[in-house]
Amino acid sequence: MTATSSIRLPKGPRGAGLPWGSPLVYFIALVVVAFMLAPIAYIIVGGFRTNSQIILDPSGWPDPWNVGNYLDVLVGGIFWRQVLNSAIAAIATTAGAVGLGLAASYVIARYSFRGRGALYALFAAGLMFPITVAITPLYIVVRNLGLMNSLGGVILPQIAFALPTTIIILVPFLRAIPIELEEAASIDGCGRLSFFWRMVLPLSVPGVITVGILAFIGSWNSYLLPLFILNNEATFTLPLGVQAFSSQYSVDTAKVLAFTSLSMIPALVFFSIFERRIVGGLTGAVKG
Amino acid sequence: MTEREHSTLLGERSPAIIAADGGSATALPPSVRRPRGEGWRTRLEIALLAGPALLVFLGFVIFPVVMAGYYGFFRWQGYGPPTDFVGFNNYLLIVQDPAFQEALWHNIVIVVLSLVLQAPVAILLALLLNRRMRGQSVIRVLLFVPYVISEVVVGTGWSLMLQTNGALNDLLEKLGLGALAQDWLANPEIAIWTLMGILVWKYVGFAVIIILAGLQGIPEELTEAAQIDGASYWQIQRRITLPLLGPTLRIWAFLSIIGALQLFDLVYIIWGQYIASTAGTSTMATYMVANGRNAGNYGYGNAVAVVIFLISLTVALVYQRFVLRRDTDGALTGGTRR
């Protein structure tokens, strides 16, 4: 399971035993990092201020710190309902994309049949069709299926649009599983399907995690599709919720900031857990 | 296994686009050889395993894309089957609409500025971080945070900060730079630069990560040899690193161009559908949503989608043909390609 770590990055306990860089490098890095994080800090810290503080001194520090905005958001039901909706959509999208994508990748990688190449090319061509292009007819398809204002109407298209990436990442991965392993299993009376369950699935875990993360974050942050499909506030996911909240409470800037910063916590937590995988997956993606 | 995993996404992406062009599927390497014949059982397995994915993909990706092409020929409000066939009329209207021309122009500006602004910054940062030193991975991760946060959060936060009485102007005044305070969002001469600033802020981390990966593919022996020959640090970067970084940069540029052509979320969230055009930040995608779905003209919206797609496809194919092609048969890639 060396997986994504084969890129030559410092491994093991982070940074331990590495030399220090020159102060100039750290200084530049510090400036850049500060610039990258300042807007995020503005959102988070701003949530601890009151509206009058924000109006009187837009770029000031909270004085005193005020947790009321955060508590209001956390106590109200809207935020949690949207977290739940986003979580359902993201988990279902991830499960669907990984499940369907893995099965299809297995066929493309390890079966030989006529049309295999065409099947692969078809999925790969999907990369050329971003959701922006298909959104209007997609909306009509979803409406005709009666899935408007339901999370299913968001999940199914998201699975479909995640499939090309998933398959393109997983196919080479599955193909790398040695044929000898399969032959040995077959001699032991293991069919191809049970080989899939018993050998392929466990062996492909690193690849599955990479595509799973991509699908999850894509779904968690997606905006255009929910914007078209979900018009009922009860079904809003977090991105729609943040936008609705900020236009509904446009006077209450502090609360909007609190709501916005709470809504990015799940993504940040998820990112910090899987940071190595995400960065590794993306870097791996361009190594070709 | 690791190498395979790493050679995936973009390595395969170029053949994918080539395949979309000529329909050739030659990109696929030969499958694992398989002694067994194609019995009915095998076929059933294939159908069972690939069927669901194929069904979902055809139904929610291919079918809508094809339908976009079909609906684009109708004047249609979105209810009942389209009947009012108008031929290429929608397309004529699009091409002649000054609002669309403006949006297209903005897209072009965004494409060019994204490359021009991000590339130098990203390359310098990547060079800076491409050394074994403490804290390197932490810095890398922090640079990447804006990329992970959703466009809505980014848009909401920035639009609050950039209001005329917002934090940025206030900060400038405190620093004694009050003269620099601007109406960042509404002034049409500045808004596009504001947008570029936000885009660079959000996406430069992605470029850094990709370029760092490319740098790590450059064999250390090369730089060591140059050092022995007495080359200075900057000479090494200019003569060895940058040329070898070519393939990585070209792929990053490709992703950036396609992304910029289809930019929607940030503009729509910060400027909304109406203000975007007066502030000079509308894009083809915001034009599509504003004049298609929001105006109830679904036929027209679909035609705009087709135009965006054709423009992106043309750019992609031209780029493939004239830029990325060097990577498929160029000698330069020997160093980074496995």
Image (cartoon, coloured by chain):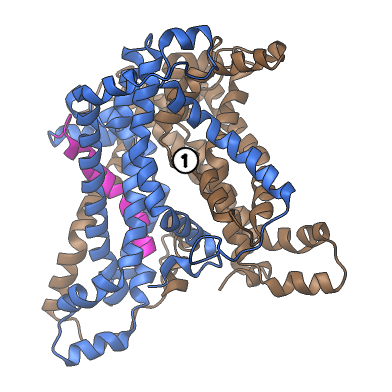
Q: Position of residue B164 (x, y in %)?
A: 56, 10
**Chain of the residue on which disc 1 is drawn:** B
Count of marks overlaid on the render: 1
Does residue A160 show up magenta in the picture? yes
Is A184 situated above or below A91? below
Q: Residue B256 location in percent, x, y? A: 55, 44
Q: Residue furthest bottom?
A: A187
Q: Which chain is brown?
A: B
Residue matched to label 1: B310
SS majority, magenta: helix
Give the residue at x 69% y 11%.
B178
Q: Quadrant of residue B26?
A: bottom left
> Who's the residue at 40% across and 47% down the image?
A271
Left or right relative to B230: residue B12: left
Using residue B32 as the reference point, say whether residue A86 is left or right of it.
left
Q: Nearer the viewer, residue A210 or A187?
A: A210
Q: Is residue B83 visible?
A: no
Residue A102 appearing in the image: yes
| Colour in which chain A is drawn | blue
Q: Nearer the viewer, residue B328 or B159?
A: B159
Mark 1: amino acid: Leu
| Magenta span | A147-170
Look at the image and tell me in which quarter the N terminus of chain A lies.
Answer: bottom left
Crowd class of label 1 (few under 14; some 14 to 19; many from 20; radius 10 Å): few
